[in-house]
Amino acid sequence: MLGSGNEGVSTIPGLNQIQFEGFCRFIDQGLTEELYKFPKIEDTDQEIEFQLFVETYQLVEPLIKEKDAIYESLTYSSELYVSAGLIWKTGRDIQEQTIFIGNIPLMNSLGTFIVNGIYRIVINQILQSPGIYYRSELDHNGISVYTGTIISDWGGRLELEIDRKARIWARVSRKQKISILVLSSAMGSNLKEILENVCYPEIFLSFLNDKEKKKIGSKENAILEFYQQFSCVGGDPVFSESLCRELQKKFFQQRCELGRIGRRNMNRRLNLDIPQNNTFLLPRDILAAADHLIGMKFGMGTLDDMNHLKNKRIRSVADLLQDQFGLALARLENMVRGTICGAIRHKLIPTPQNLVTSTPLTTTYESFFGLHPLSQVLDRTNPLTQIVHGRKLSYLGPGGLTGRTASFRIRDIHPSHYGRICPIDTSEGINVGLIGSLSIHARIGHWGSIESPFYEISERSKRVQMLYLSPSRDEYYMVATGNSLALNRGIQEEQVVPARYRQEFLTIAWEQVHLRSIFPFQYFSIGASLIPFIEHNDANRALMSSNMQRQAVPLSQSEKCIVGTGLERQVALDSGVPAIAEHEGKIVYTDTDKIIFSGNGDTLSIPLVMYERSNKNTCMHQKPRVPRGKCIKKGQILADGAATVGGELALGKNVLVAYMPWEGYNSEDAVLLSERLVYGDIYTSFHIRKYEIQTHVTSHGPERITKEIPHLEAHLLRNLDKNGIVMLGSWVETGDILVGKLTPQMAKESSYAPEDRLLRAILGIQ
């Protein structure tokens, strides 16, 4: 978004910008981060070492175009090449080659992916942000029980709780818990270090008996006690390296990896200064969390609101693709390790190209786009559905919630959603409140939080400055709402305006306002922003209206709306449905198939979409809007697409509606329609359907396509050609045959093989 020098003037950001920024972050940062994590691989004798040289990786330009990928049912992707080296430690020799890692699907200009010829889009997911959260619950005796929950970057949870005697426990499973001293000792701290790093050492010493001292006498004893409680193992286990590896894999890697976001949140919540690159849970974190929990027990500190957006993070397309890339590299590591061992066993000389295959990366992304619940087929019913689909926010998916277990409190509107998540636009049914839509001006910040823009009100500077604030920051400001935008400059100081402060709405004087909204519609999604006079509508009706707009099919004769909100052009342009001039020039030739214009000494041909089928069976068609010989500028509309007129969204018709009250009441049961709506093709739409049929070779012979179909009337076969396939241009109706197919069947019992007759006689098959 850009702020101009004129106060109150701003431009709406690109509606697909959230998808573009996420994919660019994956290409620029995510790929490099995961490649740097790829370890050096050695054989069992440590004679050969394999490693990747990340600095020289490159993505090759796709070999096919987007349209060719759609027509040929291919994936629009780029090949990833990395330099790899094989080092012989005995002779200090190195063999370096450029290897092909695999194909990475690329995002197109619509913010979508083309996988196997199908448009797919990745939905953004809302998850609980990693960090620590304090809450209290009443037990069966009505006494408050305080707990601190540490959430890892992978969604694993480690719960700290304090009992009536102020003893602190770490719950390692649903039924088992261990002392906080045992956990800290197992992580490498001794008793002296524990007491030096806590604020309440006397509380820790109060429950330190002889049995507890024996458990934390050494790190090995603490690990054995931890393992015995965590794995529910009886007897006396023996300390070993395999036991430590098992505990590391099953517990610490899942529940103690905070990530960069979790480390930042942990430092802020507990007032720590641990470096950001230290992304694992440390004993210092555990002790600081225990100190804070003790303070909660005695009335110090504040509890956390788990539903506040400052405690949520957005898992964007960058995070999802990076996770899949890391998973593919882990599979590649195991494959390379096994190949090296096999080559040495058979006394072969391996090379980097022989060790690496593209199968792990290619199959991982194919599985992700085909099976992952957050990878969905793009809804192309009309231009609005394409835009809205890419701006959805979902609580569902791996690591998230389910429609049957989510509580009403999670589904409800939260004050922190203001200006970030639309309070109206959500799905209906079991997923209500769990699938929302991003507000029109909101964006995703560097730390995964949803940021909303505001204008800063300053008496010193006359220049308006725009700020993007995260949910944790705007609570400290007095924010004027959207209806204060039209206040006269001369009388603003005398006005009393509504404002928002700490999740409450107040009425304050103008001089007390710190920030103000930039746009009255910035609190709504793009779907709700297209409803005129939405402030005069009931919220339930506005919800149904925003959902019904996405169900509108393109009409044969589209028409611009008389009453709009001014966002219709932005939606149409960002959807990619109209054809737009990329350069200025002069129109040389135009017809229904293509538009040719010349500019800067070059002649450019733009092919138009002609009666193509969308994945919702609607008709995608472009109509040229510029005559021959006209000079055009960059960004000008060349052709309108489905449900657009003059580059603006046109979903319906401007019809005259009359209401007749009956004794003061309005009845919706009886509706009268003018016959002109039917016979005048006012609401006529075209639909294109695809029918497929396959022929197989059965045990009785091959199936064949033919016009000679017995037991059918000739009237039903009138549209078939001599090959048994419907002729082009035929007018077909319900029940007509499109393709004639004959399947051979056995007519007589004697024609069966002897073993078949015996089997039928035994089983009684007629």
Image (cartoon, grey):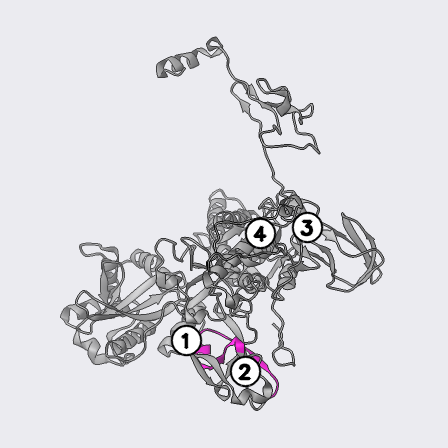
| Secondary structure of residue under mark 1 | loop
Residue 205 visible (yes or no): yes
Q: Residue furthest left?
A: 210
Between marks 3 and 2, how big is the CA–CA gap?
46 Å
Is 486 rendered above or below residue 439?
below
Residue 521 in the image: state x and y as whole percent: 55, 70
Magenta stretch encompasses residue 474:
yes
Would you name the residue on which mark 3 appears? 557
> Crowding near pointer 2: few (<14 within 10 Å), some, many (20+)?
some
The Cα–Cα distance between marks 2 and 1, rounded to whole angstroms, is: 19 Å
Alpha-carbon distance for marks 1 and 3? 47 Å
The residue most toward the bottom is 460
Q: Amino acid at mark 1?
A: Gln
CB contact under 8 Å: marks 3 and 4: no
* 442 vs 701, nearest the viewer: 442
Helix, strand or loop under label 4:
loop
Q: Which mark is residue 503?
A: 1
Q: Quadrant of the C terminus?
A: top left
Judging by the rendered image, the residue that carries numbered circle 4 is: 552
Q: Answer with mark 3 or mark 4, whichever residue precedes in sequence.
A: 4
Q: Classify 202 as above or below 703.
A: below
* Span shown in magenta: 462-483
Task: Name the residue that disc number 2 marks.
Answer: 456
Q: Quadrant of the N terminus?
A: bottom right
Looking at the picture, tell me which residue is in the foreground, 134 or 86: 134
Q: Is residue 175 above or below residue 714?
A: below
Dividing the picture into quadrants, the one containing residue 258 is bottom left
The three-letter code of the residue at mark 2 reads Glu
Q: CA distance from mark 3 to mark 4?
A: 14 Å
Q: Point out the tag, 4 or 2, that comes first from the N-terminus.
A: 2
